Image: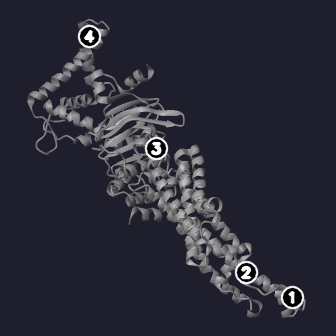
Amino acid sequence: MIEVKGVTKKFGRKQVLKGISFTAEKGEITCLIGINGVGKTTIMNAIMALTPINNGQILINGEEIHKGSYEKITFIPDAITMLPQMKISDAMQFMDDFYDCWNQKRADEMLGFFKLDKNERISSLSKGNTAKVNLLLGLAMDVDYVLMDEPFSGIDIFSREQIAEVFTSHLIEDRGVIITTHEINDIEHLIDKAILLNEGVVLKEFNTEEIRENEGKSVIDVMREVYQS
Amino acid sequence: MSRYLKLVDFEIKRFLKIYLVLVGVTIVSQLLGVIFTSKNYLNLANEMMYKEMLSKETFLQQYGSFSFLQVTQTTWFVGPIALCIVTLLIYVFFIWYRDWFGKNTFIYRLLMLPTARLNVYLAKATTIFLFVLGLVSIQLILLPIENNILQLIIPTDLRTDLATAEIINSFYYLAILFPYSFTEFLIYYGLGFMAVFVVFTSILFERSFRLKGVVLGVLYGGFSLLILFSPVLIDGLILVNFFYPLEIFLLSCLMAVIVTAMSIWLSNYLLKNKIRV
Amino acid sequence: MNVNFNNRDPVYIQVIRHFKEQIATGSLEPGEEISSRRELANKLKINPNTAQRAYKEMEEQRLIYTERNLPSRITKDEQVLKAVREELILQAVDSFITSVRSINVPLEEVLDLVKENYEKHCDE
């Protein structure tokens, strides 16, 4: 379980996170939803210790993040983190060199699924393919948790469909996933839990199937209620 | 292979192309320099002796004999050394900033490696050291070769032969690059590497606190200098002439070690707790 | 297999309904092996946990059964199969009644129209 407890964060004078708390379970897809600029990426960075927080605590399986944690949890930012001059195969080699949890078999499988040529340079990839390589590099790691920042933004519809397909496949199975989005349409049926954020606070945290079952509302219905009230 | 060594390997490969260009430019420029300078001198000698009918003795009296020192004073020779030094000085900064401001923000990857983040810092420092030492050794190999080329071009009676050690000692900048004794080597390069650590730490201050960090970084640099020179300052201002020169020297060495250790410790703290992508 | 899910009903219930329809129409036969929860999730593009939930629910309703570690199969229980058919018919009739009621049409008139149009549809 990933526990985010009362996290606050200031950038200069701007309070970006004002006491955020939520949990994300292993085996579930948790979705952080918010109109742009509500601190979704900051939360992701904070979980990965890529930005310091002012207050609060973040626990991964009950412990604070440390170097060994990066074999258990990975983060796929909204832009690829490999050098542009690298070939896809170089990037995979880099991962293999540094991570014990790198699973080459799975990486090859995803290469095939996404129809990527591993001799292509990262700088020459299309936007959609860059997003796929980015996803591949994260998902080919045998980790418990995967964080993804806006995996669907700014790419073409077919790439989006392919990426959505990944979510329902064995590539995700039994892992805990946290994804951020400002566009829920594509993934409404894929997520277990929705967390609605606004201006640095959690407005509502709910299980999507439960809200459909108990209140007969879609995620968008709830968003409308919460954001427009 | 430990992740630290893999990181060193990786960092070296990232800069290798530019580095090899630097090496190439140095070799070509210095070799051409030797040839051109020698030929020019020889042409001059020929002109003077055959056209102006100067005797060899008069020529040598008027123009002096040719030695390697004339080569070392040309841009052919000094230029590439300066170029290498400037490039590496810039790279001390660039080696960090490229991870944040490159086309793809590689710093995400580096900070998410399952290894102590200090290893990233140490690997970058090691890379700079290896590059510096590499260039220095190449220069050291080049000198005798260039000396031989000179001797092939200029006839014995027109030149003054210098040994490599003499070349180095007769030229101030080379004398710093190639210290005469091992102790001097340790001092010069120790100070250089200490400076790299201090600059790295200042960069990390800036990367952690951005604008505020610039101030902190500069203050840290100043503070380091203050510590380094504290024995000299104390001896000069407070306890005037209290220490023997050797004592001041040893205390300064100690201070340099302290500054280096402090830089590494602080960097470790910043990387662990304060750094931002 | 392409199912259009609506956003307001629980997905697992929509999955069960989808299965019931297939059973009633015979595209899934009694005793037929069905895909694993993973395959189902992938085919329907839904969350694997939802697929799991749907299977669990269907198992409780005895629509499917699982022997040891073998893949699940559609029930052979005649009573259950009959009940599924009846349930679907009733549901269809219910929704028909609701929409007809809302436009205030007398039953006789509707029934005649239904007969007429139903046969027409079948001819096509």
Distance between the Cα atoms at labels 2 and 3?
55 Å
Q: Residue at x 64, y 83 (%)?
A: B165
Give C57 or A91, whichever is nearer the viewer. A91
In the structure shown, which secondary structural element does the residue marked by tag 4 occupy? helix
Q: In which quarter of the image is residue B47?
A: bottom right
Q: Is residue A118 above or below residue A212?
A: below
Give B192 or B107, whichever is nearer the viewer. B192
**Numbered circle sitting on residue B69:** 2
Query: Label 3, on which residue?
Result: A51
Q: Residue at x 69, y 74 (%)?
A: B172
- For the C terminus of chain A, which image quadrant? top left
Q: How is the image coloured?
A: one colour
In the structure shown, which secondary structural element does the residue marked by tag 3 occupy? loop
Query: Label 4, on which residue?
Result: C110
Give B177 or A180, whichever is nearer the viewer. B177
Amino acid type, label 2: Leu
Same chain check for tags 2 and 1: yes
The chain holding disc 1 is B
Q: Is residue A211 above or below residue B133?
A: above
**Numbered circle sitting on residue B48:** 1
